[in-house]
Every structure is written in C-alpha cells, then in structure tokens.
C-alpha cells in the first residue's frame, strides 16, 4: 500500500489555462510514490455540444480543448511517471484516446498505455420510450423528446480498474467529478468498496480539486475584500492524501494565488445541496464534522469527512433541443443616449408584438441594466436617476423554436440604422441553436461501466 498519494488538478473546466499543468508536474515530480494529474473539463453543456460535434463528424466529439490541455503535459508526465486522468473524452472517449496516442507518438512517448472508460452514454441502452417516461426535474419529458445527449455519472471503480490494468492515461466520458480523484486513491490504497469513511474522504478531496484554481484563490478573489496575490500566475491545487483518507490541500511553490481556510471553505460549500448527504455514485458524503487546520503557508489539512452507503440510483443529465437564441445589439452614445436607447427598445418591441405576437423579447441596456433586469423590463422602465448621456449598448434577445420569428427580431434591430432613433451604430446579430438540460435519477443496474485498453501499434 502507498504511504501517500499526490494528485494535482490542471483544469476545472474545458476552457481552462493550458499552462497550468507545468508547475503541477514540476511539484509532483519531486515526490516518490503514486502521483496523478487530473483534468476536469466536462460541464453538462460541454458534453451536449460534444455530442452534437460527434453527430456532425464521428471522428470528433472529444472536449475541443483536448490538444491544448494535453500536449504540454504528456511528455513531462511520461518522463516523471505521473499518470493522467481526465473526462476530456466527452462524447467520444475512444476518439480522444486515439488522438492522445498519436500525440504521444509524436512527442516521443509512444509506449504510454491509454485506457478508456465508457458506458455513460445512456442512448446505447435506453429506448426513446424510456426517456419519454423519465421524470426530469419534476416534469415528464414529451412523448417524443429530441434527445441530444443522455449520460449517467459513473463512479470511481472503472477508473481504479483501468489504473490497475496498467494505464498511464485514463480517458473518460461523463463521470462524477470527484471520481477523477477517488479512482486513483482506491487504486493506490486498495480501499474497499464499503469503506464508506475513506471513500467519503476521497470524494471530498476530489470535490476540492474538481474546480481547479477555485480552491487556490481564482474564483475566490474580490479586490479589497478578499485579496489574492499573483492572479496572473495562479497556482493550481494539489492534494496530498494519506492512507486513512486525511489530506492536505496546497499548491506549487512559487505560484500565485493562495490556499487558506477561506478558499477551502468556499470550495467545500460549492454546489453542495445537503452538507450532511452529498450524493455521489461511490458514497454519500457527510461534511458536517469536517475540520480545516492551517499547517503551513498555503497548506490546509482536511479531516473529519464521513460517509454512508452509496445510493441505488445514479444521476443522469439529459440534453435536448432547446430551440434558438436570437441576439442583436446596437449602440447609442452622446447627449440623450439613454432616451434614444429607450426609443429603440420601444420601437422594436412594438413591431415584434404585431409581427410575431408569441415571441417574448428581452431588452437590456448594458451600462444601465443587463444583469439584474428581467424579461418584462420592469427595472429598465423604472429609469435610473441621473443617467442621460453616455455610451450605451442595447441588447435584444429572445428564445424560440420559430426560426422566422428569430430572424425577424434580428432584421428589425438592423433596420434601426435608418428607421430608428438617431445615431445608432455597431449592430451585431447572432442566431444560436440552444440546448436545454435537465437531471434525473436512473437505476444503477441499467448502467454498466466498461474499461478498454487502446491497442498500441
């Protein structure tokens, strides 16, 4: 059994920084024993877009940032004996694995053994009628849902097995985010499937690492309120885990950011629906007795996690056609800009009211109201005292399944160039297909994780 395991998190979402892995790899390489680098890249929307990408081209479907994130890390990890685990396989983990193998060959580390964890795609095992009967967020889907993607959140067991088979890189699709950390811990320490307290501790370590630099001060930063040094060279987190499940959160020496009780506390509470019963595929985590202790600069010791038996169901996310989002913008500047912006809004909304009465148009004036306003425009219509002149950007938006109505909105905004208030300019317009997502629970017996090793040339 390993005496300690080191796990670094190089990504908290698909758009994360490609240079984050460098300092982590350098820090991990200084240790002996099991070391792992994880990439958490798969938000629900990311997966749905990946499914659309795969439908357009069966060779695609991985997380688009795969090469940008993996290319800098492959050769250094291979040289240092650091194993990589990531859900960057998206909708096509086999395709992603093949690309990683090709890059490894190009980088001179062709002997890397790559494993694929699949089985999360429920469209392979669920019929359309199954989806139609699903209760998703309290409502039943329609009888003929246009399903784009449907994926169950797999647990850590398949990742642990892939590592046990000798994998140097484990490519997954949809797994529960903490499983990216718990899998390596189960493999390294040999934790039993019903060792609920240790499993819970591993889940908590994974929860703290899953969002990358959020726990090292990134999303925490609020100048003058919660100051964070070195945001331009922000360090990403490392968990140093003991066999009993207790662990320390830290970051590479010499990097920016910070790790303290506040940053760790914020990340512990992030997306937690019930601190006494955080449900995951591997165990139910109880956070209520967790204690945080500062044991050195940028070092927080985490103890007190406890667990209970895993649920009989798995969370699944279903994405389906959400129609279109129509967006159009125009600017007004100088004297009386606010009044001209208001007249533009009145003009467009009145015209759409008789051209397409069912279309609900939202209008915002960026610089006055754009975040806190609602679709009805009540806050904007109340007026903002003292605002008359300025440099204002008017944004119109509408969601609809009616393409003609969406295009009409875009055309009406562009028509303001000549048919609207004076001085409008800089029209930009865009029509974007929308995806809607919702969650449900499925019987875990209907979902079978699969592990495959990529054949080397």
Image: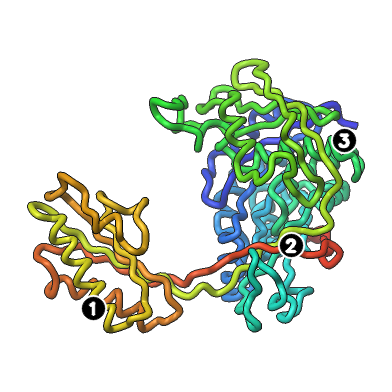
**Dot 1 crowding, Cα within 10 Å, few <14, some 14–19, many 20+:** some
192 over 321 or under it: above or below: above
Instruction: Find out whether the residues at labels 2 and 1 contact each other: C-beta distance under 8 Å.
Output: no
What secondary structure is found at the residue carrying circle 3?
A: helix
228 over 72 or under it: above or below: above
402 over 54 or under it: above or below: below
Locate residue 297: give its quadrant: top right
Image colouring? rainbow
Residue 162 seen in the current view: no
What secondary structure is found at the residue carrying circle 2?
A: strand
Locate residue 117: give its quadrant: bottom right
Mark with earlier residue (2, 1): 1
Residue 422 seen in the current view: yes
**Residue at position x 73%, y 67% in the image:** 121
**Residue at position x 9%, y 54% in the image:** 336
Task: Tell me the CA gap for discs 2 and 3.
Answer: 30 Å
Instruction: Quickly name the residue at label 1.
Output: 351
Work out which quarter of the rendered image holds the N terminus and state it. Answer: top right
Instruction: Quickly name the residue at label 2.
Output: 441
Q: Position of residue 348 (x, y in %)?
A: 23, 72
Give whichever of 220, 358 is nearer the camera.
Answer: 358
Instruction: Find out whether the residues at labels 2 and 3 contact each other: C-beta distance under 8 Å.
Output: no
**Residue at position x 72%, y 45% in the image:** 278
What secondary structure is found at the residue carrying circle 1?
A: helix
Task: Tell me the CA gap for discs 2 and 1.
Answer: 44 Å
Instruction: Quickly name the residue at label 3.
Output: 189
Task: Tell me the CA gap for discs 1 and 3.
Answer: 67 Å
Give whichever of 436, 240 is nearer the camera.
Answer: 436
């Amino acid at each position: 059994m390993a005496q300690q395991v080191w796990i670094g998190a190089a990504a908290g979402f698909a758009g994360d920084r490609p240079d984050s892995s460098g300092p982590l790899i350098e820090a991990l390489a200084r240790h002996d024993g099991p070391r792992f680098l994880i990439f958490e890249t798969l938000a629900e929307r990311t997966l749905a877009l990946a499914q659309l990408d795969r439908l357009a081209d069966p060779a695609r479907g991985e997380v688009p940032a795969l090469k940008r994130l993996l290319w800098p890390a492959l050769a250094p990890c291979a040289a240092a004996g650091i194993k990589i685990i990531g859900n960057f396989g998206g909708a096509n983990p086999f395709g992603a694995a093949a690309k990683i193998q090709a890059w490894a060959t190009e980088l001179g580390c062709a002997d890397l053994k790559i494993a694929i964890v699949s089985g999360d795609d429920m469209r392979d095992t669920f019929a359309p009628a199954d989806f139609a009967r699903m209760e998703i967020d309290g409502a039943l889907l329609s009888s003929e849902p246009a399903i784009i993607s449907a994926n169950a959140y797999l647990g850590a067991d398949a990742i642990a097995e892939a590592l046990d088979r000798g994998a140097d890189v484990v490519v997954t699709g949809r797994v529960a985010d903490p499983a990216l950390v718990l899998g390596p811990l189960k493999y390294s320490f040999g934790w039993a499937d019903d060792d609920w307290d240790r499993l819970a501790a591993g889940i908590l370590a994974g929860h703290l690492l899953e969002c990358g630099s959020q726990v090292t001060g990134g999303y925490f930063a609020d100048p003058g309120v919660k100051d964070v040094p070195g945001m331009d060279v922000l360090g990403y987190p490392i968990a140093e885990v003991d066999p009993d499940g207790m662990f320390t959160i830290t970051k590479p020496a010499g990097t920016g950011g910070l790790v303290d009780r506040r940053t760790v506390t914020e990340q512990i509470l992030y997306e937690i629906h019930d601190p006494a019963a955080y449900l995951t595929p591997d165990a139910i985590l109880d956070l209520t007795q967790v204690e945080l202790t500062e044991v050195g600069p940028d070092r927080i010791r985490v103890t007190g996690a406890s667990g209970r038996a895993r649920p009989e169901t798995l969370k699944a996310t279903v994405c389906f056609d959400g129609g279109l989002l129509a967006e159009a913008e125009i600017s007004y500047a100088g004297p009386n800009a606010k009044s001209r912006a208001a007249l533009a809004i009145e003009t467009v909304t009145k015209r759409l009211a008789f051209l397409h009465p069912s279309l609900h148009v939202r209008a915002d004036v960026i610089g006055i109201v754009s975040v806190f306003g609602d679709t009805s425009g009540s806050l904007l219509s109340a007026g903002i005292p003292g605002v008359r002149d300025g440099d204002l950007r008017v944004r119109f938006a509408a969601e609809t399944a009616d393409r003609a109505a969406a295009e009409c909105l875009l055309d009406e905004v562009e028509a303001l160039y000549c048919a609207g208030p004076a001085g409008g300019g800089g029209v930009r317009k865009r029509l974007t297909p929308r995806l809607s997502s919702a969650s449900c629970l499925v019987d875990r017996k209907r979902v079978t994780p699969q592990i495959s090793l990529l054949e080397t040339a």
